[in-house]
Amino acid sequence: MEMASFIAAVLIQSTPILLAGLAAMITLRANILNVAVEGMMLVGAFVAIAVGDLTGNALIAVVSAVFAAFLVSQALAFFTLKLHADFIVAGLGINLLAAGGTLFLLERVYYNPGGLRPITFPEIWHVPDGSLSFIPILGPAFEGQSAIVLIALLAIPACHVFLYRTPTGSYLRAAGEDEHAARSAGIRVNRMKTLAVAISGVLSGLAGAQLAMDRLHFFLPEMTAGRGFIGLAATLFGNGLPSATAVASFLFGLFGAIGDRLQAFNIPAQFVLMLPYVAAVVGLGIGMWRIKMRNRPAKIEGEDKRPGA
Amino acid sequence: MLKSLRSFGLAILPQAAAIAVTMFLGFVLVAAIADEPLLAYRELLFANFDSRSNFALFINRATPIALIAVGIVFAFRAGVFNVGGEGQLYLGAMAATVVALFLSDLPGAMLLPLCLLGGILAGGIWGWIPAVLKVRLAVDEVVSTLMLNFVALLFTSYLVNHPLRDPEAYGALSRKVPESVWLPSIPGLPNASMGFVAAVILAIISWIVLFRTSWGAEVRAAGTNIRFAEAIGTPGGRRVIEAMFVAGAFAGLAGALYVLGIGHRFEQNFSPAYGLVALTVALLARVHPIGALLTSLYYALMLNGAAYMQIATDVPRSLVVLLTGLLVLFMTVRLRPPRVVG
């Protein structure tokens, strides 16, 4: 039982990171370092709570959150691909806009800069209690998880199939690997990049909805707290592969869950909260060190110096 | 003369256009929600000059932004996208506070330089870590500096909430640093900290170092093309790491000067995202130290103006975050496609 509740905690911690990681992964495969995942998540979280409060319907709330994040992603695509803005700078701009825009709406529309806490909020579909108890350990861990957790888990194989088993996926990867070659082969590079950004918007919106709707049922300014960036770190850690990104996301989720447990042992909260971020930096370092070690013998002396990377 | 003026004009045109478009969109938004949009914009832009004390606050606001931005110029010139200004700033402020509190028996003339040194080193090390990770292991610096920001913020939050907390103060504040290390104010401008003078001098020195010394040339070469820089025999990787140390040191110094000149203690959340604002400033200034200094003034104007605007009208101050987002989004927009290289 103890084990099951710990796995459940890991799942809860991992899901937003996993969705953010997959979102960043799809764009990374199109050769875009998408720092805007954070902002799109925030927009998703805000819209989920605002629409849920307004309509009283959880499904409409999730769909609106996804759609809002999708719209933001398309704004990013427009500014970078049509207006040639720098991707990282524009992404940071999107993050600021999301933070400023949600805060502005909280102050202006809800007259409460502290957050948006509806008194009643529609419950998102959760796996009913006792329905999976015939499976040892994993069954109870999945009971009570939201539908978005299941979607996130399904998104791992879905991303794999999309990237490696569909023509569009291979066009997308080709556009990311060598833009000029892809263009010569007749692939519409910008369309592929727009698609990648759109998918990452949808996944980020889901991540935000999960964060706000699963347990908390409220929105706080900056409630994403860097989870989008941890997802980005998971993608880089996982070298842009769906399965490895997922593993890295679960690792970060594990650290988050361990952190929550440690809080019971009178360790200052700050050090506990620090764990996933430290894990991300150390993990990235180790991951890149392993790649470097693996690549070393195959390279000719002097060629392993990456140009700025 | 006319020609150089023309090229200067062309160089700043995209930035000026981005600012103009942002301010215009901001005005449309304000006009849509406020009863007195003109008053709101007047407060936003000009209330800083209404009184001497407003102007002093404006100068104090510009100081950390200018210092971090000039540091970020070093990082950018070395090809590093340093998003870690915030963490470096906090650690610098914390280091200065710790030094001042624990060595408070020393005379001010000795303690003040030690505090500054502490801030510089703490910030510098926090810039050095992602640089080493980037140069040696190709770890993406955008992600690592962002993660390190969270670590620095949480670590300083622990220190100010537990060991350093002032038991008599309300909120997460450290004890006050001894008065012997308080920075004097600018003559004729009470409450405006001398830190701004330091920022101006350092911006000029930075321009000379970056553009008139061989070290600066090597940093810029490493930033433009590190493989080429190393092929012609300059230590490119080392220059990148050194430039990032300098960038962190500038942010750390900004934190130290904030504590010594303005706050006189470490306050949790003392920075309204100065790190990110400074990044914006550095980019708006086209990665030029003097430009960064001037642009930081524009930003300080907006940040402080927003507070006056909120007091005088019904426009919330988060408008400025919104405008910053728009500005950052517009900032690198080019209507003509950039030249494709390679």
Image (cartoon, grey):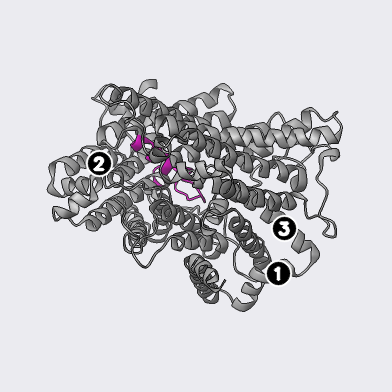
Residue ID at (32%, 45%): A23
Closer to the camera, B83 or A96?
B83
Figure check: B234 above or below A70: above
Q: Is residue B32 left or right of residue A175?
A: right
> Which is in the foreground here, disc 1 or disc 2?
1
Closer to the camera, A308 or A128?
A308
Q: Label 2 belongs to which residue?
A: A155
Under mark 1, the amino acid is: Ala
Query: Which quadrant: the N terminus of chain A?
Result: top left
Q: Are marks 2 and 3 on the same chain?
A: no
The reply to whether callout 3 and callout 1 are in contact (CB within 8 Å) is: no
For disc 2, the chain is: A
Camera sees residue B273: no
Report which quarter residue B143 is drawn in: top left
Q: Label 3 belongs to which residue?
A: B59
Q: Is residue B192 left or right of residue A106?
A: right
- Which contiguous range is marked in magenta? A213-236
Residue ID at (25%, 41%): A155
> Which is in the foreground here, disc 2 or disc 3?
3
Q: Are marks 3 and 1 on the same chain?
A: yes
Question: Residue A236, how many percent across, how many down?
Answer: 35, 36
Question: Residue A184, how many percent across, how many down?
Answer: 16, 54
Residue ID at (39%, 59%): A85
Q: Residues within 10 Å of mark 3 (few under 14, many from 20)?
A: many
> In whole angstroms, how far apart are the C-alphas of marks 3 and 1?
13 Å
Under mark 2, the amino acid is: Ala
Figure check: B311 above or below A201: below
Secondary structure found at label 1: helix
Under mark 3, the amino acid is: Ile
> Which is in the foreground here, disc 3 or disc 1?
3
For marks 3 and 1 on the same chain, the one whose residue lies earlier in the sequence: 1
